[in-house]
Every structure is written in C-alpha cells, then in structure tokens.
Image (cartoon, grey):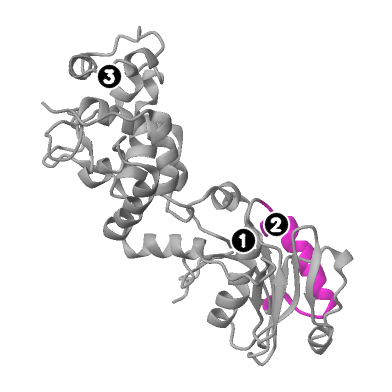
Amino acid sequence: MNLPPLIDWKEIHARLEEIFPQGTPNREHATWSIAAKTIFVMLYVGAVEGADQWLRPNQVTRMTDVQAAQTDESSRMDWALSSMAPDKGDISGRWYAGDTRESIRDDTIRSSLVRLGAVVERAGLATTSPASRYALQKEFAALLNPDVDHSAFVAQAAIWREQFLNAGQLARIALNRKRAVDASGQVLVTFPNGETRAMTPGASTEIAKAVIEVFAPKFLEQPGVVFLSESGNKVVARDDDLAKSIGLNISPDKNLPDIVMVDLGPKHPLIVFVEVVATDGPVNEARKQALLDIAAGAHFPPEHTAFLTAYLDRSVAPFRRTVASLAWGTYAWFVAEPERLVVFAEKPMFIGR
C-alpha cells in the first residue's frame, strides 16, 4: 500500500484557511483545528479516494502527538489497524475524548467537509453501519502535498474551488471578497438617488453597502436613505429634507439604528429601521420597542414600520449567536443570499388561506 505524503496538522490548518476563504458556508467547522486534525488522520491512514481505505471518526480521537510523529509507512499501517480495535479509553495523550467522535462526525465531517466536497463517503453502507466510511477527495488531498510551494498551492486551491464548489458557494465567496473602494481605501456606497458616500472599510460597512445597493432596490418600490451611520456612531449621511417629508425628526441622540430607509412607493410610506450585525446588535424585542417609539414620534403606525437585521451570511457565527434574540415581527436578510428574506412572523401566515 502506498500511503500519501504527510503534512503536519498545523500546516493543514493554515492551508484550510486559504482553501476555504471567508464566505464559504460553515467555514468555521471547515477550518478549525478539529478539521485539520481529522484530515491529518485521513492522510495518516491513507484514506484517500481511490485507495479503498476509509476512516472512522473515532480514529481521530485516538491519535496522539507521539503517534503523529511516527511517520514511516510501517508505523502508519500498524496504527491504522490497531486504531480500529474497541476503545478501552486508556490511550495516553489522545487528541480527543472518545465521546467526541459524534461531534467530529456531524459538525466537521458531514456538515462541512462532505458538503464542501473535500471528503467523500463510501457507497453502499447503511446509515447505521459502524464501518469506516470517509476519505479525502483525491483532488483535495493533492492540495496537501508537502512538496508544493506556497504560490503553487494558492493557484491550485483556486482551481479546486472553481471545479468543485457549487455556484452558490462560489457566489458567497465572491460576494465576501468584493470590495469597491476609492483612492483613499474607503468603501464607496451608492445611494438610491445616485449620490455616493465614503465609509471606513470593515465588515459592518460591507453589509451596510449591500443593504443600500442591493436590498433596497430589490425589496422596496421607491427607496430612500434617511440616515446612515457606521461603527462608533459616526453619521455618514442624513437627509433632513427627506426625513421632514415623512414627518421624521432625526435625532442621533435617540439611539437611531445603523440605517433608516423609507419606501415612498406605497400610498402610505413605509419606514424601515435596519440594524447591521457584523458581531452583535440585532433587532431584539427591546430594540424593536425603542424603534417603534421613534416611529410613533413621526406618526408612523406599526403597520407602516418595518425592522430589518442584516447579516453577511447565515452560516457564520454572528447570525447563529443572535438568531434566538431576533424579535417577532421583524426580518433578517443576508448579503450572501440577496434574493431571500427571512420573516419572523408574529402569527402563522397560512391560517385563513
């Protein structure tokens, strides 16, 4: 049996950051140390597509630093066999406790590496079968060749993404990498009326830019931006004339949201409060009530007021961390999936239809 060349798990970790750039679905679990160590064990035992050698998740838990340092082919083959024996729980220095195998299987392998095409599953096995079933896709394994220098690796990783990530995954990555900056390095935001404003680069700015340039024309009939701020509560734009036309008194000391928009298309204009979440700060129940109070001051009833929390991607930590706190009767929108809008309905929308 010809085993593939080995690369240290820490180098695998570094390469995963390049192979799966920001915007990759479930990137957290595709690039963390558990993924790197899982892939290392696959290489160690020769679990690469076409070799008819497969990995069981509990083998990852049984690896140790001492064993990982034994890289000759004989040691690797002996361990591949011995690691399949029943777990007696007495492995000194094991990488992970035995009861973490299900997490490795579900979070790292199935939900991330398999879905991204980096790992393939053995055909013909029942779902409940305890047999070994996972191996590295052969083209992905080639990205981990220790003899490939950095520049060649970067080029090969780009080719691999183009060939094996689906269109939606590639679109997410492209959206995340896209930057529109002026000569000073600031991000240029184009308003519905054609004006442009410069904002400081950052995750919040990228989301705010997408809300104004993508969300607004897609979901509003005749959008206008009344107020825009950036991190640190710096006011980037405020349109007092537009605000007065709808009866809204803009007072930043009232703790306005990141963006206030208006849709002048309906017979009764709609005011839209937007919170941009790069880390925290969604429209929760308390925030919604505070914004309702602001709207009421402008004589906007609740039925003509909307609340939006905007995120980069629903697969990343900020959304997963804050989704449970989003207020009922609000919306969530993702830069990575601009055609869709999540509605947190206060009552079932299908009743009575």
On residue 71, which mark appears?
3
Instruction: Please report whichever mark, 1 or 2, sits nearer to the chain's N-terminal start.
Output: 2
Q: 321 and 91: which one is in front?
A: 91
Residue 188, image quadrant = bottom right
Q: Is residue 294 magenta?
A: yes
The boundaries of the magenta stretch are 280-303
Image location (x, y in percent) of residue 341: 51, 69
Residue type marked 3: Thr
On residue 328, which mark appears?
1
Please report the residue visible at 70 percent of the width from the left and 86 percent of the height from the top. Answer: 269
Question: Is residue 73 found left or right of 316 in the rendered image?
Answer: left
Residue 84, image quadrant = top left
Determine the secondary structure under disc 1: loop
For the residue carrying disc 2, how many other residues have a C-alpha within 10 Å: few (<14), some (14-19), or many (20+)?
A: some
Image location (x, y in percent) of residue 344: 56, 63
Asked whether the viewer can see residue 166, the reply is yes
Whether tag 1 and tag 2 are in contact, CB under 8 A, the answer is yes
Q: Which residue was labeled with disc 2?
A: 285
- Which quadrant holds the C terminus? bottom left
* For residue 299, above or below residue 89: below
On residue 141, which mark appears?
none
